[in-house]
Amino acid sequence: MVSQNKLIEIADIQAAAKCLDGIAHRTPVLTSTTVNQITNSEVFFKCENFQRTGSFKFRGAYNALSQVSEPQKQKGVLTFSSGNHAQGIALAGNLLNIPTTIVMPENAPIVKQTATRGYGAEVILYNQKQISREELAQKLADEKGLTIIPPFDHPHIIAGQGTTALELIQEVGELDLLLVCCGGGGLISGCAIATKSLLPNCRVIGVEPAAADDATRSFKSKTLQFVNNPDTIADGARTASLGKITFPLVLEYVDDMVTVSEEAIIRTMFFIWERLKIVVEPTGVLAATALLEGVVKVPGARVGVIISGGNVDLMEVGKLFSSI
Amino acid sequence: MVSQNKLIEIADIQAAAKCLDGIAHRTPVLTSTTVNQITNSEVFFKCENFQRTGSFKFRGAYNALSQVSEPQKQKGVLTFSSGNHAQGIALAGNLLNIPTTIVMPENAPIVKQTATRGYGAEVILYNQKQISREELAQKLADEKGLTIIPPFDHPHIIAGQGTTALELIQEVGELDLLLVCCGGGGLISGCAIATKSLLPNCRVIGVEPAAADDATRSFKSKTLQFVNNPDTIADGARTASLGKITFPLVLEYVDDMVTVSEEAIIRTMFFIWERLKIVVEPTGVLAATALLEGVVKVPGARVGVIISGGNVDLMEVGKLFSSI
C-alpha cells in the first residue's frame, strides 16, 4: 500500500485540539465495575454522546470550518448528511459565523431536519431516486460558490475526530487496546493516528455491523469494497465505503477490523443504557459491542472504547428494546 | 421549632465522605450550554444516576452499615424498601460482608426483586393489605435479632446522603442555589446541612411532585403532614411523610419547598435524556424540573441540581415519552 506521506500527523491532531479548546466539550471518561468484571479487563469509555450536538462529528466539523479561507467563509459551506455530521457542521457554522447549507434526502427524519435548522443551517431536501447527493452538492456548490466539507474524507475532519483519542489517552494514560466504530473511517483514522503516535504498542481495532462490513472486507482484502444501502440499525455505519483518504489510513494505522450482529448491537445498547445510565445511539455502541459480546477478548488489558454518539429517537426506544 | 441540637453536623458528613472514599463513585458533574441558555443561569448537575446501584441511596446505606456493631454485623441487617434503598443496602451488605434482608411488597417489580437478590440480599415479600412493612420488619428483626436500617430517618443515612452536596461543592465551589428532590427527606437534610455549613449564603430548595406534596405542606405549616399512596410517577417521592429526624432538619436547614406537575416531570425527563444524554428516573429529575419549567427562576445565579438516580424500566420509556 502506498503510504499517505504523512498526510495527517499527530501534530495536526494536536493543532485541532488547540482549535477546539474551550469550544468542544472535553467529554467524560466513564468506567464501570460491572463491565470490568464481565470483560475481565479495565475499560475506559470515552463518551462522545456528551459532545456538543450529541456526537464526535462536531470536532471534525469545527476544525474544518475554522480553516476555510476568509472569502470561502463569506460565501459559506455545504455538506451532504442526514445525520450527525449535518448537526456538527450546522453548529460549527453558527459559532464561526459561516453560512451552512446541508443537503439531506427528503425522507430524513423530521427531528434531524429540525435540529439541523435549529442550529441555523439551510436544509435542502432531495429525492434520492432522482439525483445523487454528491451530484446535487457539486451543482449547488458550483452555482453558489460554496465550499464542500465532506463527512469524513477530508484531512481537517480526520484530524478533528482524532482529538477524541488524544483526549482519552491524555486522561487515562497507557492503553493496550482501543476499540473504535467505523463508518466512513474518519473517526477511526484520526484516532488510530493519535494512538499509534502516543502509544505505539496499543492495538487499534475497528468495529462494523456485520450487515455493513465493507471496511472489514476492504481491510482484509486490501482492495476497496462497498455496500449498498445496508440494513443495519447503526445508521452511522451505513456509508457505502471508506474514502480515498481514509482507506489507506485504515490500512496503515489500524490493526484489525471485526463485525458484530444487529442483535448484539441492540443487546449492548440496552446494557449500556441500563448499567452505565447513558443514552447512546446504535452506532455509538459498536465498539462496546465487540468487547461486551466477546468478539474481542483481552483479559487483563486496559481497553479504551469510543462511544461515538447519542442521537437516537427516544420514542422508538421502547419498541427497539422489547425486540430483544 | 426545637433545634436538633446538632444531631448531624458537617463533621459527620465529612466522616461519611471518608468512609465512602474509594467505595462509592465520586459522580460526575455535568453542564449544558443549552440548559444555561434556557434558564439564564449557570447550572451544575450532580449525577447520582452514575452512583453504584444507580442512585445516591448507596451512600447512606454504606455509611450506616459500616457503623453497626460487630455482633450486629454478624446477625445481619434488615430494611423495608421496594426501591433504590433496597439495592443500596444489598450492595453495601455484600461489600461489608453483612447479611441483608429486604422486606418488599409482593407486587414490587420483578426487575427490582431480581436486582436486589443479585447483590446477595434475602428478599421477603409481603401483602400490603395484610400487614404494614414497619410491623413486619419489626417482627422479623425481633425474631432474628436483625438491626433495622430505615430508608431515611437515621443519622448515618442522612450523613451519607449529605456527601452528595459535599462533593458537588468541592468540585464547583460557590453556588447561589441548590435544588434537591424530596421524598422522606434523607437526601435533602444531609445536602442542606453540608451546603449551609460550607456556603452559608447558598439557598436550598426542595422539590416534590404536586401529587405528593406532604413535605411542602409540612414545611409551610410547620406541622407534619402526610400523603396516602400518592399517584405520582416519581416513585422515590411516594413516602407518606418526612421522618421524626428529617422533618426538623428540613425546617431548620431548607429555605423553601416547591412542587411540580406530573406532565412537567415527564417533559423534563425527556429533555434531560435527549439533551444531556443521560438515563434518569422520574424522581431523579424533580430538582431539574423546578428549574427548567420556571417554577424556580434565578437569572444569573450559579445553581446546583441533584440528579438523584437513574433506575427506570427502559421497556416502559417509549410509552411514557409518547404521552407528552
Image: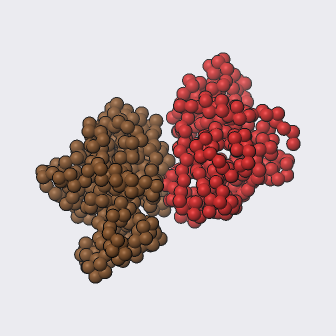
Chain colours: A red, B brown
Q: Position of residue B218 (x, y in %)?
A: 18, 53
Q: Residue furthest right?
A: A1
Q: Is residue A293 above or below residue A165?
A: below
A275 versus A99 height, above or below: below
Q: Residue at x 80, y 53 (%)?
A: A217
Q: Position of residue A200 (x, y in %)?
A: 74, 45
Along the line of sight, the residue nearer the viewer: A127 or B123: B123
Q: Which residue is most to the bottom?
A: B143
Residue depicted at x 30% and y 53% = B12
As drawn, which residue projects farthest toward the front? B70
- Give the x, y percent position of residue A295: 70, 61
**Residue farthest to the top?**
A71
Viewer-closest of A26 and A244:
A26
Residue A186's quadrant in the figure?
A: top right
Give me the residue at 23% from left, 46% from top.
B254
Q: Is residue A164 above or below residue B17?
A: above
Left/right placement of residue A126 relative to residue B210 reads right
Q: Position of residue A68 (x, y in %)?
A: 67, 24
B282 left or right, relative to B205? right
Q: Is residue A73 visible?
A: yes
The quarter of the displayed image where residue A51 is located: top right
Q: Is residue A230 above or below residue B315?
A: above
- Residue ID at (59%, 36%): A58
Tell me, yes or no, if residue A308 can be seen here. Answer: no
In this image, B11 relative to A219: left or right? left
Label tally: 0
Observer-nearest of A312 and B227: B227
Q: Nearer the viewer, residue A278 or B191?
A: B191
